[in-house]
Amino acid sequence: MQLIIIVIMGALLGFMYGYTTDGFIFDKNICLFAGLTLIMPSLFKFKLKDTILVWEYKSVLLKGLIVNYLLLPIFALIIGFMTNDFGITAGLFLLAVLSGGGMVMHWTKRSNADTSLGFLLLFINLVFVSLSLLMLHLFATYSAGYFGVTYDEQITIRRFAEPVITLLILIPFLASRVVLLIKPLLTFIESYSKYISRISIFVILFYLFGLQSSQQLIDIYDFEPELFFIALIAVAIFYLLIFIASKMIYNLNSPQERAAFWQSITRYITLALVLSTFSASTFGVSMLLPIMFAYLVQIPLSVVISNKYMTDV
């Protein structure tokens, strides 16, 4: 509940700031901030020796890859095409190909899943961000005609791949290795990780919703208010399908498969929001809508799953 309030307050206050002022101009360093405050702490317990778990639990990894990079994108495309909106479909597709997130290890630990494998899966999914961006590019290339829009090759999502990988993967990983050598700093970050992540999420949302481009949501509300309702329903159905499929595919009695289960249930919403801000001019501002509503759906869903389905495992 606390996190939901932080999300709503960050988004609303940021949007009001942008509405009453000239708003922020996007700076890619927000990715560096997200990488150091949200991603880096999750890499502290990742050790190179843990990579042997990939071979030991290769069947679990394969399940995760099929679910996260094949099944969920198919769900997103089917639902997105039914909305008949390019931006909403792009937002759903981006959520579908971004697995994990800042909260995934919280749910992994809470359900007594294999945290070592969970950290490894999280790291692998971060490395696969480049694949996610390529998939988004391919989606736009081949679906723009269906929606009757033009996908401008001069502003494709591919041009963001290098800074995203550098700021969200490479630098956070290297920084985590440095922090591991500084024990007082490591202890401080781990002791206050919950507060650091909450403050970080608030700052990121305040900034992103305070951007000049985010004010275009007002135009959507004025001219196409139905898109808000359509996006909310689309996101709810998307997460329902994720839950049903994941519960059928993963064996929740296995600590390793529970770790992979949470990597599918939890989408990297904050990273999706950062990336969608990069590309709103390409896909349309409506791309932000499903990502906004994902905060309101994913967090309560995770609480329900954790309390109802994980208490006896």
Image (spheres, rainbow, N blue to C red):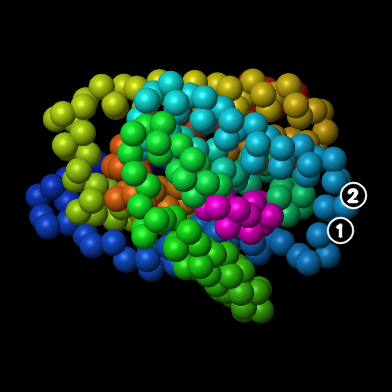
Magenta residue check for 84: no
Q: Quadrant of residue 106?
A: top right
Q: Residue at x 37, y 66 (%)?
A: 28
Q: Quadrant of the N terminus?
A: top left
Residue 165 placement (x, y as % from top left): 54, 65
Residue 234 placement (x, y as % from top left): 43, 24
Q: Residue at x 36, y 58 (%)?
A: 155
Circle 2 Cα neighbour tier, 10 Å, few/some/many (<14 / 14–19 / ≥20): few
Residue that label 1 marks = 52
Residue type, mark 1 in image: Ile
Which label was assigned to residue 79?
none
- Judging depth in this view, the residue of 116 and 73 nearest the camera is 73
Q: Secondary structure at mark 2?
A: helix
Q: Are marks 1 and 2 in contact (CB under 8 Å)?
A: yes
Q: Quadrant of the C terminus?
A: top right
- Judging depth in this view, the residue of 41 and 142 nearest the camera is 142
Residue that label 2 marks = 56
Residue 60 placement (x, y as % from top left): 80, 40
Is residue 117 shown left or right of residue 158? right
- Can residue 277 be seen here? The reply is yes
Residue 256 placement (x, y as % from top left): 80, 40
Q: Which residues are magenta?
A: 122-134
Give the spatial CA distance, label 1 vs label 2. 6 Å
Against 8, residue 119 (above or below) is below
Residue type, mark 2 in image: Glu
